[in-house]
Amino acid sequence: TLGTTPTWTTPTPTHHTNLPTYPFQHQHYWLKDTGKTGAADVTTAGLHAADHPLLGAVAELPGSGGTLFTGRLSLRTHPWLGGHRVMGTVLLPGTAFVDLAIRAGDHVGCGRLDELTLQAPLVLPDDGAVQVQLLVGAPDDSGHRTLSVHSRPAAEGASTTAQAAWTQHASAVLAPEAPVASDSPWDVWPPRDAEAVGIDGFYATSLQQGFDYGPCFQGLRAVWRRGEEVFAEVVLPEEELDAAATFGLHPALLDSALHSVALTGVTGEAAVLPFAWNGVQLHATGASALRLRMVPTENGGGVSVHITDHGDRPVATIESLVLRPVSAEQIPAGRAPQDQWLYRVSWEAVASGTDAAPEAVWLGAGERPAGTEGLEDHADLAALREAFASGRAMPGLVYVPFFAEAEPNGQAVPALTAARTAAALALLQDWTSEPAFETSQLVLVTRGAMATAPGEPVTDPAGAAVWGLARSAQTEFPGRVALLDLSGTDLPLDAAGSAFAAGEHQLALRDGAVLVPRLTPAQVAPEAAGTAWSSEGTVLITGGTGTLGSLLARHLVVEHGVRHLLLTSRRGPNAPGANELHEELTALGAHVRIETCDTADRTDLGNLLDTITPDHPLTAVV
């Protein structure tokens, strides 16, 4: 401070601090990020812990006798699952379905998995997560219960209406546990007269077939063969030993054991995955190393498996396991996060609200829908303002018709659209600029302007344009403007007014139901991904001489065999690099035309399309 003699601290001797060693030296100094933030207390949500690594909670379903198990899976919280990659996609292994079913069966007193059939692969995305549900039904007269396994992509923070649809992956039947012969099928190990089978190149061969197994799934250590019998030893890697105790039978360990099925001759040369399990019963839990005997079933369609631990104590028996060949076409691609951002607008019915419909008036002359006869009417906004100038409270809703004319007087649709939108714009500007209307909502009423279901026609395109304009006004002036589309001549004021009072701002009335638009995940049709490009058809690429257009043109020629390209831009052949692009694509075997065209100009574009010859018709536009 000012006026005092400064005091200096004693200097600290300098020295070097050794940094942690590098990761590949396998000396870890940092906590491993598993993506978990601690076990959640599901009892606060009225649930019970499921006590299984792949499940989070369990709930009894009152009245039905059923039980629901829920879980959330991702490669961040369960990284070992990333070691089961098939045809380039991470799939939940079939052995995990078995362990989940057995856990569910134990909970409801059905310790035997009578049968389980896998119906669709459960894909784990490289990023993001999936929600999993197991639904166990009520017991039948014999004590058997049904089980189904469903999943859907987990949308963070999304409401229920924005969630993707559920996909069923497996169905099963659980049965009360039954006594089975579980003695070891061998007296010495390895069994007498069994010949060792070399497995050094097994995982390399598996990789060539599309099975990319991670360390956790490479547990096969030795295989022997005696006639049709196959014997094998498998172990879990050291990092998964602690996890083994949390499963009935660790899915990676059982999956590794089943890799020896390729040596039975049942599947031939084909790459296979488990399809149907019968008579699965667990005798002990927590095994980290297994011995097994596998033989073809009598009908030759599968294998039966007897499993013990390394002390020859029984672990599990599988009466029959059926496998099916798998190809890349059968494996759905993993959903990346951006795939979950693809949404579409769907119209959903809303229940009749309890909110009272606000006072309403009708504005303008002309057609009045049935049901609005009792509404007070006014010619325009000026008349409305004058009628309520004496201090009378403004109505909550002001309905204004924007119906298509019965006879358009020969006007083309563009002219009608321009006239209607100009009238709507003037009305919206007057409405939003008048302080007297701030407590009211202007409702623009159309008919046939919206398609609320696939195949429903839009009979009033000019009305659709009014909707687009009004939606912009809704964004600028929240709560001031609403939209209502009719399909008939009736307007049920109570239902519509109640929905507006509940906070809805866009409605469609269809067959007495009140529909509202909602964003829902877009379901891309599988066949869309396999659409073939025509080698004889012409592909038009607008902006085809630009950076993206030229990249796409090369891609279509090289990767998809497109041979006729029409590239357009505002500068056409005079665009920078156009000549070089033409020469390059021609050298690749394509017939290329580069033309000057403003594709926003209807006449200009029409003239261009007229130059496409019938022998190479237009088959795609990008």
Image (cartoon, rainbow, N blue to C red):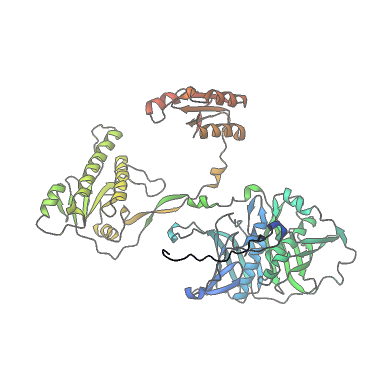
Q: Is residue 31 above or below residue 342?
A: below
Quadrant in which residue 606 is drawn? top left
In the shown orientation, is residue 378 left or right of residue 273?
Answer: left
| Number of on-image labels | 0
Q: Is residue 116 something that shows in the picture?
A: yes
- When the figure is inspected, residue 536 is found, relative to residue 42, above or below; the finding is above
Q: Position of residue 245 (x, y in %)?
A: 68, 72
Q: Can residue 486 be seen in this snapshot?
A: no
Horizontal side, residue 564 vs residue 182: left or right = left
Q: Quadrant of the N terminus?
A: bottom left
Which residue is found at the position 27% from the left and 36% from the top?
418
**In which quarter of the view is residue 175 placed?**
bottom right
- Compare residues 590 and 407 and report the one nearer the observer: 590
In screen coordinates, is 48 left or right of 94?
left
Quick one: which residue is furthest to the left in this view?
390
Reply above or below: 385 against 531. below
Q: Is residue 423 left or right of residue 26?
A: left
